[in-house]
Image: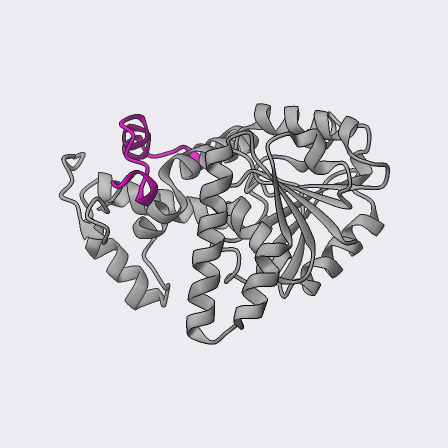
Amino acid sequence: MKHIAVIGSGTMGNGIAHTFAQNGYQVALIDLNPQALEKALQTIAKNLDRMVTKGSITEDVKTSTLGNITTFTQMEEGVKNADLVVEAATENPDIKKKIFKDLSTYCKEGAILSTNTSSISITEIAAVTNRAEQVIGMHFMNPVPVMKLVEVIRGYQTSDEVCQTIMELSKAIGKIPTLVNDYPGFVANRILMPMINEAIISLFEGVAGVEEIDTVMKLGMAHPMGPLQLADFIGLDVCLAILNVLHEGFGNPKYAPCPLLVKMVTAGELGAKSGRGFYDYSHGTKELKVSRFFAVK
């Protein structure tokens, strides 16, 4: 396996491309938007510069990593030589299904099709292809070049051979893969998102403020960041989408998104990427934002 195609050049996509390229794989980074591809390459270069400064890689590794990445705006052209495709597009089932249906046509026989989805059913995505046994989940963690975990998700028809190949490949790029089965939220988000949602409910009900909730979880539970700051980092729209998948998938009211989360996403306050979430990032640093919402009594 030498040629990797990554679909989507956003935060996850460029991190995945960076990781494979740094480990010597030829990477086709695909996005319909040329400006997005240019921004992705700038981000990868900036992250590599940071690694050079820290002494974790050499200037030669930086140069070879960037040289291993080729950008494409046409998916058909970008995936034609791929041994593995990693889809990292928007967390939307319809968009992902359209991509995978096209990949069935564009990709060579034997190519493995993977998705970086954090919650959407692998079996459901695989069903639109002509190679369900070769479809698998590769849920990378953000930031991809730093975080070690890859949650490898086996769909209902995913073959043992494909599972083994992806587990070995994940190790080859310096990750620690964990194989899980295809249920809503898998393991990571089935556990994480209810915790984040409960933190938002605690804020909504006036149990404590943003900083207080995050401080309890950081100092009391040894979490590197509090759940509200983590939600901002993930993206509140992404958190809402995952909670909706859990709620619909299990039909259990415990997964229902907090009304405050729904209001914030509707208002465009999506966290760090929009400049405002539970904290204010508009000045380039994280600052506490005074909530306009009163506690529900």
> Residue at image x 23%, y 54%?
285
In the picture, residue 276 is in which quadrant? Answer: top left
In the picture, residue 125 is in which quadrant? Answer: top right
Per the image, is 238 magenta?
no
Q: Position of residue 177 (x, y in %)?
A: 65, 59
Left/right of residue 13 with respect to residue 227 in the rendered view: right
Task: Magenta stretch: give its range.
Answer: 254-276
Closer to the camera, 49 or 163?
49
Closer to the camera, 177 or 175?
175
Q: Is residue 55 above or below residue 161?
A: below
Q: How is the image coloured?
A: one colour
Q: Quadrant of the C terminus?
A: top left
Left/right of residue 2 with respect to residue 149 in the rendered view: right
Q: Position of residue 207 (x, y in %)?
A: 20, 47
The reply to whether residue 123 is visible in this rendering is: no
Q: Is residue 84 above or below residue 20?
A: above
Per the image, is 269 magenta?
yes
> Residue at image x 36%, y 51%?
230
Closer to the camera, 267 or 155?
267
How many numbered discs sit on the rendered protein?
0
Q: Position of residue 110 (x, y in %)?
A: 85, 41
